Image: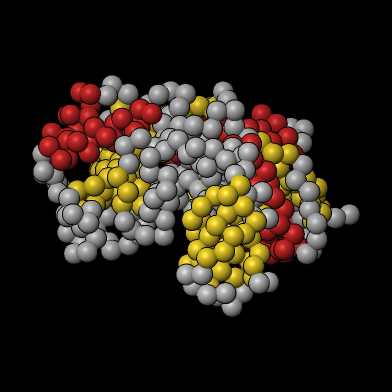
Amino acid sequence: MNKNEEFIVDIIDSGFTGEGIAKRDGMTVFIPNAIKGEKVKIKILKVTTSHAFGKILEILKQSENRKNPDCETYAKCGGCSMRHIDYLKTLEIKKNSVISTLKKALGKAIEINEVIGMDNPYNYRNKLQYPIGIDEKEKPTMGVFAERTHRIISTQNCKIQDLLSQKIANSIFQFILDNNISVYNEKNLSGALRHIIIRIGKKTNEVMITLVTNEKNFEKEQELVNNIISNFSEVKTIVKNINNKNTNVILGKENVILYGNGFIYDYLDDFKFKISPMSFYQVNPVQTEKLYGKAVEFANLTGKETVFDLYCGIGTIGIFASKKIKKLYGIETVPEAIKDAKENAKINNVQNAEFFADNVEKFLPKFINQNNIKPDVIFIDPPRKGCDKIALETLLKIEASKIVYVSCNPATLGRDLKILEKKYNMEKIAICDMFPFTSHIECVCLLSLKK
Ligand SMILES: C[S@@+](CC[C@H](N)C(=O)[O-])C[C@H]1O[C@@H](n2cnc3c(N)ncnc32)[C@H](O)[C@@H]1O
């Protein structure tokens, strides 16, 4: 097989990001935008020793699951990858991709016990995060990065963003244009505004805006703040975050409150949560309630248990389960998030919780040794890179009767489960679609200690 060759192929499977898969000359060919069951004419774009990549030239037989993508930037943007597929079908693709990833990691067949999809998979995000920069014509632009690049695709109407957040972002960007406020130029690291981050409490309708800047102060700063608050009464706070490093990390270390208290509130079920700019908060609150509900169901708590909530963020999972817990310990690396977690416990009248700001892998071995505390149930919800090896080894030493592992990355989940398998059986696994139409999926697994 050679680059630029053209073939007609049958799409026999779907890949992890929703791309179609065909076989030709014993090789696997990945074809973005093609759907299982279709017959397509393709052109080969790249060939490696084991596989190739192609692009569709013509669809000869169309899948009944093909949908018209309802988004003008879909073909260019790096956000969604499954908008051309019927939503229910995307859930099946995600389920199969988790099964295949875990099967590869664990070396045995696994079953997904439940797939938790969204009734209305649109405008679900509570966090808009748009880079601002310079386009090819040297003009300011705001939007999302094209896949695997730093080219900004101008975005005014993203179908997964909250409508009010999108409206506020558009209005801020218009103000930037109208007032010639300088925007960040990655090429020479000059210019002021780098990112707009808008978080909305979907239940409270409270909005927090973080303006990430390359410079300590930018022109018309106060005018911009006045403009936002006079147009949008929902905006409760505006924070300037200073990031003058040449890095892909979005937030810098320094925050300056320009308006309000520097935080907003939201509710998950009946629990109220304080959210500040540096703290993690799940981006899809409708699904978060279902995800946490499933995690708590899997834990099957009776009220007598000592529980660890590892990688606890602002304390959400533990507080969500707190009525069925005797004593809760939460551990999280971001100090601002732990400050929020402590306050969230107070706001929700949770008196049986303690929170610690530290790395799980550093804190856990020390804490267990010094305090002789043995948890009955451990929730773990690490970032995409999964758990550190020391954290996993400590979990194996602790021997809690149950571990409920919440993961946003099936690959690292599989790697970690393989280690935990030494002492734990995997009892159940559910997947929850926190990120409809993207390639991402959240998993929740119940592990029980081997007898
Ligand atoms: C996927 S989030 C989950 C947060 C929380 N459970 C929730 O649902 O909102 C992962 C959290 O782990 C924290 N984190 C990352 N590395 C960590 C580490 N080594 N030790 C403790 N916390 C860590 C992050 O700051 C983030 O808050």
Q: Identify the residue at image location x=54%, y=37%.
A: 67
Taking depth in this image into account, of 214 and 11 the one nearest to the observer is: 11
Farthest residue toward the right?
451
From the viewer's perspective, tell me whether residue 313 is left or right of residue 291. left
Spot occupied by residue 234 in the image (x, y as percentages of width and height)? 32, 23
Residue 238 vs 449, above or below: the answer is: above
Farthest residue toward the bottom?
49
Question: What quarter of the picture does the C terminus occupy?
Answer: bottom right
Question: What quarter of the picture does the N terminus occupy?
Answer: bottom right
From the viewer's perspective, tell me whether residue 366 is left or right of residue 182. right
> How many circles with numbers are drawn on the protein?
0
Q: Could you say which quadrant of the image residue 20 lies in?
A: bottom right
Q: Identify the residue at image location x=49%, y=37%.
A: 68
From the viewer's perspective, tell me whether residue 12 is left or right of residue 229. right
The image's colour scheme reads secondary structure
Q: Identify the residue at image location x=71%, y=63%.
A: 105
Q: Identify the residue at image location x=29%, y=31%.
A: 168
